[in-house]
Amino acid sequence: MAFLSVQTDAALPAPGDRAADSLDFRLFRPHLFFYRPWTGSGEMQAPNGKRIAGFTVRGEGRASSRLGRIVQHWSFDNGIEHTTEWKVLSTDGDDYRAVDTVNGTVARGRQIGEAFLWVLKVKGPTPFGHRTIRVSTVYRLVSPGVAEARATSTVFGVIPVGRMVATYRRLDGEA
């Protein structure tokens, strides 16, 4: 749930390419990862790969049986600070919906194999003027307690306007 998105065709490693190969390790579940304290860092890139900005992010969440909240605190290397709070609902265990409590943005999430995909639409500046931007972010576990996110932002559904790559670490070391 970042400002940029990840393509769903991002290369995911084969199951045998990981240090641990159990199903519990491979399957990224947002409610198991982000509902405890975590920290992360990454960078935002132009479609050509040129670095736009670096960032650090930290957060934590809490959950009941089907509803959770995740608060994220973003710090960009240009001095901008941004906080988001998401109310997350698991609709059937595999599908999720999240609503930004500040601006009402809705994100939809679902399992895609071992990874998890969040998709949201936001209004923002693009090379084509102020437009709706589709942000797709794919999360996957790279080791116990460490997740990677790759995002791609597009306008008109096909033209990339930005990318994001980030690594998140659970502070308790477990995912």
Image (spheres, rainbow, N blue to C red):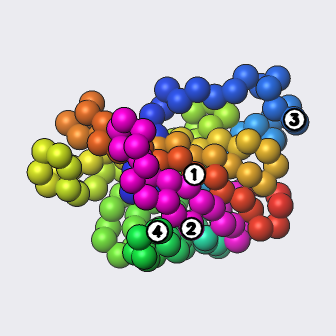
Above/below status of 60 relative to 93: below
Nearest to N terminus: mark 1 or mark 3: 3
Q: Nearer the viewer, residue 32 or 83?
A: 83
According to the picture, the residue beneath numbered tag 2 turns out to be 57
**Mark seen at residue 166:** 1
Left or right, 127 with reference to 153: left
Name the amino acid type tagged 4. Answer: Phe
According to the picture, the residue beneath numbered tag 4 turns out to be 76
Splitting the image into 4 quarters, where does residue 175 fall?
bottom right
- Residues rendered magenta in the picture: 32-57
Q: Are marks 3 and 2 in contact (CB under 8 Å)?
A: no
Residue at 20% x, 36% y is: 156
Image coordinates for residue 151, horizontal then vertical, percent: 46, 44
Residue at 35% x, 38% y is: 47
Name the amino acid type tagged 3. Answer: Ala
Q: Nearer the viewer, residue 52 or 126?
A: 52
